[in-house]
Amino acid sequence: MNWLRKHDVCLDLTNLVIHDKDHRALYSSGNISLGEVILAVPWAIVIRPDSISELEEKITSLCDKSWKSRIFLAISMLEKRNGKYYNDWFNTLPKDLSRYPMFFTAEEREYLKGSSILVLLDKDREIIERIYKEIIKLHPKLKIFSFEDLLSYCTIIESRQFSLDVNECCIAPYLDMANCAVLGKENTTWEFDKETQCFQYKAICNIKKGEPVTYIQEYNRF
């Protein structure tokens, strides 16, 4: 939290509640009025995909544009995770991904037998594995990251990304701590404010103190 304040993120209207080591959520710290900006994260600390020229053409040939953005974002996160700048935020990410379908056990997958989700999961895993093999051939220094590392970060990105457009995603630290809601039940909308150069949550109804801050993941187009 100190890291966020240091980078001009106003936290006056929210509390981060730690439910357990892998579950955190945002709650309102006071009564919030309709239209009020609850939280704003400056563009300067947003994590964006870093394109690597020698990988660009190969990855483009292996997947569509949205996947390419996620892969480069995952690589960017892997390269930043051991640095000091984002260290406090990286420590908030879940360590145990077993609750994500991509990491279900064989027994858990049996409950999904016959569902299209298994086909989609296996297809995604195949894409990531194929890309990983090409990445380490073309960019050997990335061998310090394992296939499991890349798979884990692609999975984390899937549930936490904010999209600049339909083909490019990014991570806005702290905004990803809000609770995903069922469509129509959310109490905020999120947007990129060009004037302040911030990703922000804005209340779409009155929110009482102690209520969860909720949103719907959707594309934010500039």
Image: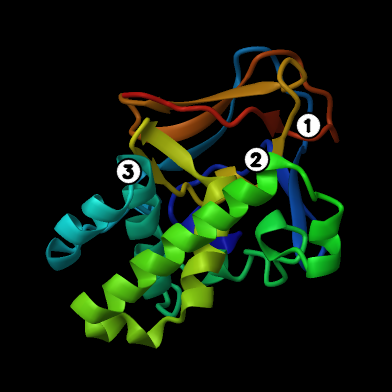
CA–CA distance between discs 2 and 3? Answer: 40 Å
Residue 43's image quarter? Answer: top left
State whether residue 179 appears in this view: yes
Q: Specify whether 26 is left or right of 210.
A: left
Q: Are marks 1 and 2 in contact (CB under 8 Å)?
A: yes
> Where residue 64 is drawn, which disc sits there?
3
Q: Is residue 202 above or below residue 104?
A: above
Q: Which residue is mark 2?
A: 12
Residue 58 or 10: which is nearer the viewer? 58
What residue is at 61 percent from the left and 59 percent from the top?
1
Q: Which class describes the residues within 10 Å of circle 3: few (<14), some (14-19), or many (20+)?
A: few
**3 or 1: tag closer to the N-terminus:** 1
Point out residue 213 in the picture as x, y percentages from the top left corner. 73, 33
Camera-side residue of 12 and 101: 101
Q: Tag 2: residue type?
A: Asp
Residue type at numbered disc 3: Asp
The residue beneath circle 1 is 30
Q: CA distance from mark 3 to mark 1?
A: 43 Å
| Mark found first going from the N terminus, 1 or 2 | 2
